[in-house]
Image (cartoon, rainbow, N blue to C red):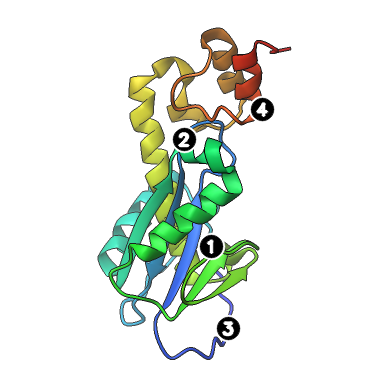
Amino acid sequence: MQQVALQWGVNGLIAGVDEAGRGPLAGPVVAAAVILDDLHPIKGLADSKKLTARRRDLLYDEIRAKALCCAVAQASVQEIDALNILQATLLAMRRAVEGLRLAPKLVLVDGNRLPVLPMRTEAIVKGDALVAAISAASILAKVTRDRWCLEVDQQYPAYGFSRHKGYGTALHLAALQAHGACPEHRTTFRPVTEVLCGVWP
């Protein structure tokens, strides 16, 4: 990955933050925060969506082994439905940063919205492709959520979570129409709402 050389003017630790699972119709939104160790660089970091599942799994283990510290957190389906997906995402991000063993001086967040944190924060559009710590966070969040999908697939096999990871694919929409919503579905997301209200086209 072509990492940008950015000067933050910060004397202290820098954490990268990213999320996975804003778009799906089911499950929690997961966020991760990572402080990398300059003495133990990790090769091949990139936006998690650009990597194969196998490569993400390998990097997940390497990040957990080599980072100075990292934390993964989530906001539940119930919190997503109560707050809306944006606010739930920011909540998960805040929880991830609060879960770090070491306190960063600066938090770099992928995207253009920032959680409320006591330290300096900056939003980096496409940060998961530009900043190594954000890339690492995107991988931890993506792998964690994908593993959740595999687990919930065992509990609710009719929906195919292991295949579509909760996104609104034709397979998922057909399962929703056939079986209704399960407890892991986000009731405020339109396709799920339509099923629950009996207005499926």
Q: Using the image, determine if residue 92 lies above or below residue 11.
A: above
Q: Where is residue 28 in the image (x, y as percent from the top left)?
A: 45, 40
> Which mark is on residue 190?
4
Q: Of 187 and 168, which appears nearest the observer?
A: 187
The three-letter amino acid code for the residue at tag 2 is Gln
Q: Of 128 and 11, which appears nearest the observer?
A: 11
Query: Which quadrant of the view contains residue 82?
Result: top right
Query: Which quadrant of the view contains residue 8?
Result: bottom right
Name the residue that disc number 2 marks. 78
For label 4, the SS is: helix
Specify which label sits upstream in the sequence, 1 or 3: 3
Specify which label sits upstream in the sequence, 2 or 3: 3
Name the residue that disc number 3 marks. 6
Specify which label sits upstream in the sequence, 1 or 4: 1
Residue 17 visible in the snapshot: yes
Q: Residue furthest right?
A: 201
Q: Using the image, determine if residue 159 lies above or below residue 115.
A: above
The three-letter amino acid code for the residue at tag 3 is Leu
The Cα atoms of the two marked residues, 1 and 4, are separated by: 25 Å
Name the residue that disc number 1 marks. 115
Asked if the residue under mark 2 is in contact with the one under mark 4, i.e. CB atoms within 8 Å, the reply is no
- In the displayed structure image, the side of residue 177 where residue 183 appears, left or right: left
The three-letter amino acid code for the residue at tag 4 is Arg
